[in-house]
Amino acid sequence: MSKEAQLSIAERDFILEALREDVRLDGRQPDQFRPMDITFGEEYGHVKLQLGKTSLIVRISAEVTKPREERPFDGLFNINMELSSMGSPAWENGRSNDLEASATNTLDRVIRHSNALDTESLCIIKGVSCWSIRADVHVIDYDGNLTDAACIAIMTGLQHFRRPDAVVKDGRVIVYGVEERVPVALNITHKPLSITFNTFNDSKHVIVDATLKEEQASEGDLVIGINSAGELCYMSKIEGSPINPMVIVNKTSVAWDKVKELNLIIDKVLRTDLAKRAKVGMADESRAENDRLVATE
Amino acid sequence: MVGPTTSLSQLNRADGSASYKCPATGYNILGAVNAPVELPGRRDALKPEEATVEVFVKPGTTTAGVGERYVEGILRSVLGKVVLGREKGFPRRGVVLTLAIVGGENIERGDSYLTILPALLHAGLLAMMSASVPLSMTFAATLLCVTKSGDIVRDPSPTAAKAAVSLHVFAISSKSHLLLNESEGRFDFDTWELARQHALSICQGASDSSDGDVSMSEGKDGSLNGFIREAVEDQIYSDYAYKLDSI
Amino acid sequence: MSTPLVLLPSDEVPRDHLPANNSNPLRLGPGLRILSQPSSKSADSKHVLTATQAGLLTTDAKKNTVSLLSFPNRRYIPTVNDFVIAQIHHSSADFFHCMVTPHTAHALLGQLSFEGASKKTRPMLKQGELVYARVLSVGVGAGAEVELTCVSPSTGKAEGGMGPLAGGMVFDISTGMAGRLIRANSSSAETDEIEGLVVLSELGKKLESSGGFELAVGRNGKVWVNCSDSEENAIRATVAIGRCLQETDQKNLHPHDQKKLVTKILREMKLA
């Protein structure tokens, strides 16, 4: 069960044949992402991402903990992705698989190792206490391109999240509740995303945002992690057929365009949601004030 | 009081799915069922004559621990009782239920897991129905807490649940059988019986309860079982709209 | 037909919803079971029909059947006589082992269960090839194996297009949609709209001039489409048909919207 059902010969042949005519099964262009929908839950840092039929939920959480001994000035940041049989019947509950390992590794390198989240800003008292930020990825529907989808959702979540305010008083850490003090946004240094390319027909045809069937028919993949400024932070070509170096050069600029495009979408949904929250917050405040007035009368 | 909300069959890959959100306790659960499927590597452990129900609870912002294993056991026993595992296509196969806690606070280590149990049970049951797993009956579950002053409060918030003298979860079938009774804390039999009657009226909408605060906005008859029924009916009506239009 | 009735597990089928025709024995479809209730008041045994799944109760007075239409997204469970599209996984001395639904046990297809097949002329099917087959038996009891066949047991002929499927493309659809397509196809009604579906007849009209298409529907939620007669349009026509069927299924489109969808997609695929 730990493997997706194999593609039939008819499907594989058809997908390859169609790409020769630049046709994809859902009518998309080779460089086109599927329709993307980002929504937020009630809590900060709760993101639901729908990318075509791939769907996942990311929840960002924070707790105060002790920093690592070798890095007393750094807070902690971890990405946790456990694939359960909710996302695909091929994934067994409580058992990790290759996809989980490789996707987690890519996410770690693109987001964590590129220091997208400034972990030094998470330090509260040197060597004693710091924030530990955790991103939990719940894949609820899997139809290909897990890595890019998770990357978009985590980056959106990190920018949306607000951690409780904490101050040091007489050597003790006081964490204020969300009601007591306005919670604090995380310090994001840059906004990298991963773009996964799949290659077909001796790398003559290269597409982005492959569906599961396209991934299964593909001969290899190329993952590029890049930010809006065009700074490359990750590139991998782990397995599959070789790729012509010129393809990599060309696709790096495609990836940069895509990341700029996606980051614009993310900015827009973040702005809309935060504006909505501010409105609700103000309404709550005035209601609370009214209540107080009523109480004093 | 704002009633729970639910939706069915929203996932593509899973054979059946449902979400269940309880605003009073803040929990939002997403459930997915794959059935009947082959369970790899466990052939010796399978019962030859019937289906094996597997339950997996995935916490929202931590790694699963003993608390999750504990509720999984309860869920497996309740759902195992109502799944008709001998129906065609099910013997020796697996019914795999995955429940993800996608909204609400984390349950801290040492805190009671009973508070989340009704939401998990409802999401699980609805996902089972969405996957068309044969069942002998449906049920509804409720959480009641007994406060220091002896009041019985339905669906307490996590803070209220922590302060409670005792917590009770009852699952009651659509035919009024008591399917599950889990209690925690100190209580005497009279209190438990009172809580059970309370639960019965919440789940079944029995009118003999004189208690005024059981005002509900759920099903037609105000009961939780009625709410479950309406949720399922709504989904069926929308799935078969083409059939109903032509009548 | 009386008012639509949705049953939940353990609900009884009301007697007034059963077909009135008593000359034939009543046939029960999936999702229902018969329970006998001991009755203390009268001597006659009381039988009740109860639901085991949630679904819409449907009856057919002509065939004297009663069944429950449950959620269309469910997994396919092999049932005798159903047409399915199976994928060869491997072969052994006497059988091809086929996948009917992913992550379930393989179904068996006899190496000689093809029209005119003998030891020498049997088809040599490779892993990943597709066949259009019928469920021959599902066995009894635990651990029973599902057996498929590509010939009609009564005539020995490959009726209804059974046999290996060469070329073309398969698309995944819900099991509910597969059922609708099959019922619409077997219906003798002369109208365009059967089972709320006009998508196929609409596609048929619009693609007829460019060569038409071949279609095989498997109850296991698969549709095989072949447009090899459309020559240079073959790929785009196949994709268009697949997209129309999948979108009609996923969005549960009304017949009116199905027509619009066909027009939109054919234009997008440069076929109209």
Image (cartoon, coloured by chain):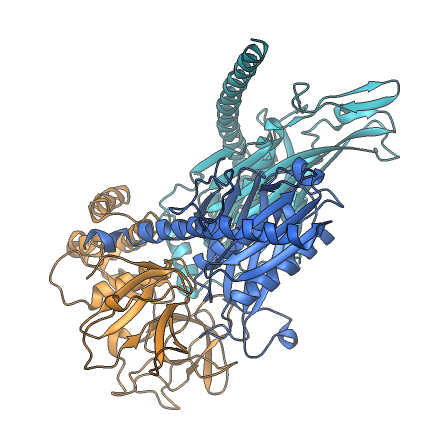
Chain colours: A cyan, B blue, C orange
> From where the camera sits, is residue B124 visible?
yes
> From where the camera sits, is residue A93 visible?
no
Question: Number of numbered discs present?
Answer: 0
For residue C96, what is the image quadrant?
bottom left
Residue C192 place in picture, x, y as percent: 14, 56
For residue B94, what is the image quadrant?
bottom right
Residue C61 place in picture, x, y as percent: 19, 71
For residue C225, what is the image quadrant?
bottom left
Against C160, is A215 above or below?
above
Name the residue: 22% across, 71% down: C19
**Residue at the extreme bottom:** C119
Name the residue: 84% across, 33% down: A66
**Residue at the extreme left:** C190
Residue A152 place in picture, x, y as percent: 56, 35
**Quadrant the N terminus of chain A occupies:** bottom right
Whether residue C209 sits left or right of residue A103 in the image: it is left
**B31, B178: nearer the viewer:** B178
Whether residue C195 sits left or right of residue B20 in the image: it is left
**B127, C7: nearer the viewer:** C7
**Quadrant the C terminus of chain A occupies:** top right
Residue B125 place in picture, x, y as percent: 50, 56
Against A264, is C56 above or below?
below
Name the residue: 25% across, 81% down: C25
